[in-house]
Image: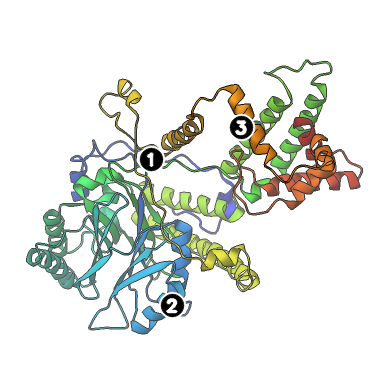
Amino acid sequence: MLIDTNDESWRNDPLPPPPNQPPAAPTNRAQGNAALITATTPRAGKKKTKASIKLAALNIRGNGKEKKWWKLNQIINHERIGMLIVGEAHLDEERLESIDRVFKRQLLVKYSKDPRTPNANGVAIVVNRNQLKVEDIRTREVIPGRALLLETVKHDGKPLSILGVYAPNTPSENAQFWKDIQGWFTVHSSVRKPDVLGGDKNVVEDAIDRLPAHEDSEAAVSALDDLKGYLNLVDGWRETFPTTKVYTYHQVYTGSQSRLRRFYVKRDLMAHTYEWEIETVGIRTDHRMITMKLTSEDAPSMGHGRWVCPPHIMRNKNFKKFVHEAGMKLINDLLKIGRPIPRTPAHNEQTVWKEWKDDVYAEGHRLAKIVVPKMDAEIEVVEQRLKDVLADDALSEEERKLSGAVFTEHLAALHRTRFRDSRKTAQARNRLEGEVISKYWSMINKPRKPRDIIDRLLKDESAKTLDPVNYKYETNSKKMATMARNYHNKIQKDRRETAPDIRDHTIDVVLTRTARKASEEHIRDLSRKLTREDVQEALKLSANGKAPGLSGFTYEFWKILDDRFKTAVSMDKEGFDIIRALLFSW
């Protein structure tokens, strides 16, 4: 049965669980190879927190009237891509110079143009300067305009070789293309073979990667298979998702789809790849972007970072209601301490304040996971519907093709709308703040460089008894931070023991030599308790846009609470007085 794509009621339906598919026997080349690395391949969808490089590949179908190259910078920043392989780059010297002039602080673009069609085709590799060091990068043209080799080093100092390709469409030329690449590496035997081969292959190895399903040219498939064997490469996506049907190219006129864009990685690197994804982007193209993350065996664990309460959560009515009710209870609990309830080390103003902050943090964190902007929610629903349609074997191929085409086009339209809105917001901010001295102006004009990552710290000898084999180094970033903190705290305490009388005498000598002393007025000011006006003034003078504390809430959050209380008072309503709570707690 064909899905009625004019029926909008599906938007409100609960998302069905993914279909349960029993393990299938290998039916294609990729599935046949999967058994060889099952023990080392990361579980599909599993999140890791190691230091990594995010690699991506996308066919942009030329620059176009919308100046797609100008928009790639936004995609790279938003998706936090370290390196992007671009097919059909359509660059020439003039365009490359203009891109470098505008984005030289953010991007490094390496390009190979097709000598037969200088203003068409072409392959490029874009490096994000904010994430990767570009000083050691070297490129080689394997096949001009079709295959570009980039050599660099990873965070751990080990070499990394990326081969970006844009293969010909014609089956005979496609077959010869893979043979030419193999021949090039045979002749240039001293050049490091690619660790990753990514880009448009314009051929699929198995029928599962086309909709409707059909086999491709045997000559082209065999030539590609020979190259993979010569370079010891495997199809990373298919190894991770052996039976999943998902595509990177949608032919608008026929509705046909195919997985032409793929990343091949060295077999021994497969265990160090994760988060394989196929994503729709916000620029006008009939191709989807593929991404994956590459790490190394001894890369440090970086963690997820400190949680920060998103601005839209602060405006959420459920969160506002929770903060208000929890705040009123906080005031009530603070009033009881020392009156009917005795003050103890386990129950006092500070412990009650901490409990309130912990509760608000937990609620904000919970809501941040389930409350998403309307556009993001709609995109998530359409993506799930597309996956369900493509995986539904109860539908015929023609039905899957037509329904999948509609959902694919709808998804692309939603992404373009979100991308356009985000771009308008960025342009508006640039017009307002781009030419005045401000935090934003400083941010966009300061030199950028990737962070220096501390790979490991040497453990002390006491750790040997706990882990005799791996005691020497610590690679977990959170534990390394604790080690550094303990080290510096220890330095503060590791000082020479001084007799009390000598210490007192030394202090007196230093104080007698101090010319400036606190006046009586200053002493009185320091001795008095803080007033409501003091706290309000301090809150007013606190800077916006600063990093939050461990609670995840910025200064703006506390200012919002104070503003809400003032509004409630002006309307003769009950409100949570955050200033009063602060005075009680401290």
Q: Give whichever of 583, 296 is nearer the camera.
A: 583
Q: What element carries label 2?
A: helix
Residue behind mark 3 = 506
**Residue plotted at (37% across, 78% down):** 96
Residue behind mark 1 = 301
User: Of marks 3 and 1, which one's residue comes earlier in the chain?
Assistant: 1
Q: Is mark 3 on a helix, strand or loop?
A: helix
- Mark carried by residue 101: 2
Where residue 181 sits: x, y (%)?
15, 66
Quadrant location of the C terminus in the rendered image: top right
Q: How crowded is mark 2: few (under 14 residues within 10 Å), some or many (20 or more)?
A: few
Where residue 173 sits: x, y (%)?
17, 73
User: Of marks 3 and 2, which one's residue comes earlier in the chain?
Assistant: 2
Residue 439 position (above or below residue 372): below
Q: In which quarter of the image is residue 114?
A: bottom left
Q: Is mark 1 on a helix, strand or loop?
A: loop
Q: Which amino acid does label 2 sit on?
A: Arg
